[in-house]
């Protein structure tokens, strides 16, 4: 039996051709280390061009580091971060945000499809204001959410406005930010600084790089000394050009959005093919590259028999993720196996 990891996650895919050729190109000869090279400068300049603002950009190895170090730089140890119950920073980072911030507390709120609502955030901010309570300092939202849903620019702006009025900063976990851009058609600035976002962790791994996430500071006051934080955390790459070169190439040629759009389209194709099959119900809006489906227990066993690996860590729904590498024939094969197992 063949093991099929195509839909287990968007990080089961390999490295996309654009990132691979950028690595090969960056490998020709010596270059300055620790980010003083031309690739890193070019990638940061391209972020400023794409986001149309003078942001400060750092490259780290993975998303847990990006989020944790960004949040640590936004908080004192006695602060708290308001986020969703299902947020990656809360349930998938092994306490790294608390660890790197020396004790910041995460205050979690519920919300449909992984989304924060301004009213729930407000309730959490105003619940306590006394000195015995960890002072709310940041609102952290995930775009697209862990459940595959999008926030509109207006929804982000509403949360940001509330945050600003209460003296809080706004952080976005954008591990799949390109998927949100591709799906909504919004510009990078519309879903970030123009909507009030102070810091964006922008994911590269899940759109086709081997590794590498960008921490983008729109509020440059927050990024002072961020490089020291990266170094102390073991996240200052000495051969930084191998994190930065794929970013430079993919921002330049638009493939970061193209690959995300392809992954989104595959998710829509899958949802369209399995929606309405007996026993199958799609659990959340399919607005990015994830499909969550409730399936009968016996169907899970039959799909496992056919080799399909996927996660069921949120509720008991199956999560099918699509990536830059997902082929239409893979989608159709999975859909056919689901139909046959129904
Ligand atoms: C994948 C992912 C990350 C990054 O995870 P790492 O494994 O640390 O790279 C961050 N946030 C979300 C929502 C993710 O899905």
Image (cartoon, grey):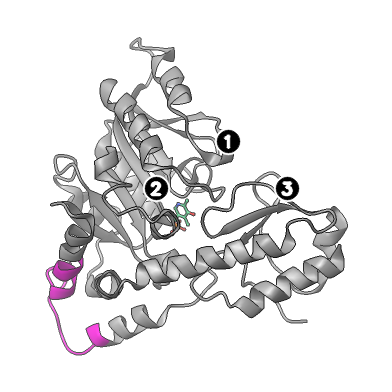
Front residue of this view, candidates 55 and 233:
55
| Disc 1 Cβ-to-ligand 1 distance below 8 Å | no
Residue 66 % position (x, y): 34, 52
Query: Which element is circle 2 on?
Result: strand
Q: Is residue 304 left or right of residue 108?
A: right
Mark 2, other Cα within 10 Å: few <14 / some 14–19 / many ≥20: many
Range of the magenta residues? 25-43
Whether residue 10 is visible: no
What residue occupies the far top of the structure in this picture?
130
Residue 315 % position (x, y): 69, 44
As for residue 272 lying within the magenta part, the answer is: no
Residue plotted at (52% across, 63% down)? 264
Query: Does 209 appear above or below 297?
Result: below
Mark 1 vs mark 2: which is more N-terminal? 1
Query: Does 154 appear above or below 259?
Result: above
Front residue of this view, candidates 257 and 132:
257
Whether residue 53 is visible: yes
Query: Does 94 appear above or below 183?
Result: above
| Disc 2 Cβ-to-ligand 1 distance below 8 Å | yes
Q: Nearer the viewer, mark 1 or mark 2?
A: 1
Q: Where residue 173 is drawn, which disc sits there?
A: 2
Residue 143 % position (x, y): 43, 48
Query: Which element is circle 1 on?
Result: helix
Residue at label 1? 112
State if disc 2 and disc 3 touch (CB < 8 Å).
no
Q: Quadrant of residue 82?
A: top left
Q: Looking at the rendering, in which quadrant would you find the C terminus? A: bottom right
Q: Where residue 316 is drawn, which disc sits there?
A: 3
Q: Quadrant of residue 2?
A: bottom right
Query: Does 47 appear above or below 4?
Result: above
């Amino acid at each position: 039996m063949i093991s099929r990891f195509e839909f287990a996650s968007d990080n089961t895919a390999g490295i996309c051709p654009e990132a691979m050729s950028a690595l090969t190109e960056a490998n020709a000869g010596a270059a300055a280390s620790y980010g003083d090279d031309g690739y890193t400068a070019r990638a940061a300049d391209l972020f400023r061009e794409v986001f149309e603002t003078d942001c400060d950009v750092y490259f780290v190895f993975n998303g847990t580091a990006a989020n944790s170090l960004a949040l640590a730089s936004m908080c004192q140890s006695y602060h708290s971060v308001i986020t969703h119950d299902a947020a990656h920073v809360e349930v998938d980072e092994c306490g790294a945000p608390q660890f790197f911030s020396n004790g910041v507390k995460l205050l979690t709120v519920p919300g449909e499809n992984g989304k924060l609502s301004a009213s729930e955030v407000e309730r959490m901010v105003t619940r306590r204001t006394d000195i015995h309570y960890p002072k709310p300092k940041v609102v952290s939202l995930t775009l697209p959410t862990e459940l595959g849903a999008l926030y509109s620019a207006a929804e982000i702006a509403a949360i940001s406005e509330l945050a600003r009025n209460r003296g809080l900063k706004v952080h976005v976990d954008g591990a799949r930010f390109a998927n949100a851009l591709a799906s909504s058609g919004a510009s990078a600035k519309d879903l970030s600084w123009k909507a009030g976002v102070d810091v964006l962790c922008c994911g590269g791994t899940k759109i086709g790089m081997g590794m590498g996430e960008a921490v983008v500071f729109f509020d440059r006051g927050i990024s002072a000394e961020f490089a020291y934080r990266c170094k102390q955390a073991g996240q200052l790459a000495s051969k930084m050009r191998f994190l930065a070169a794929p970013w430079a190439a993919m921002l330049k040629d638009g493939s970061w959005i193209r690959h995300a759009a392809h992954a989104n389209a595959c998710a829509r194709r899958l949802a369209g093919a399995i929606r309405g099959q007996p026993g199958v119900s799609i659990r959340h809006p399919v607005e990015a590259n994830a499909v969550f489906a409730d399936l009968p227990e016996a169907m899970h066993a039959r799909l496992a028999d056919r080799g399909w690996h996927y996660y069921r860590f949120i509720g008991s729904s199956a999560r099918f993720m699509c990536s830059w590498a997902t082929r239409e024939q893979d989608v159709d094969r999975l859909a056919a196996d689901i139909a046959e197992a129904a």
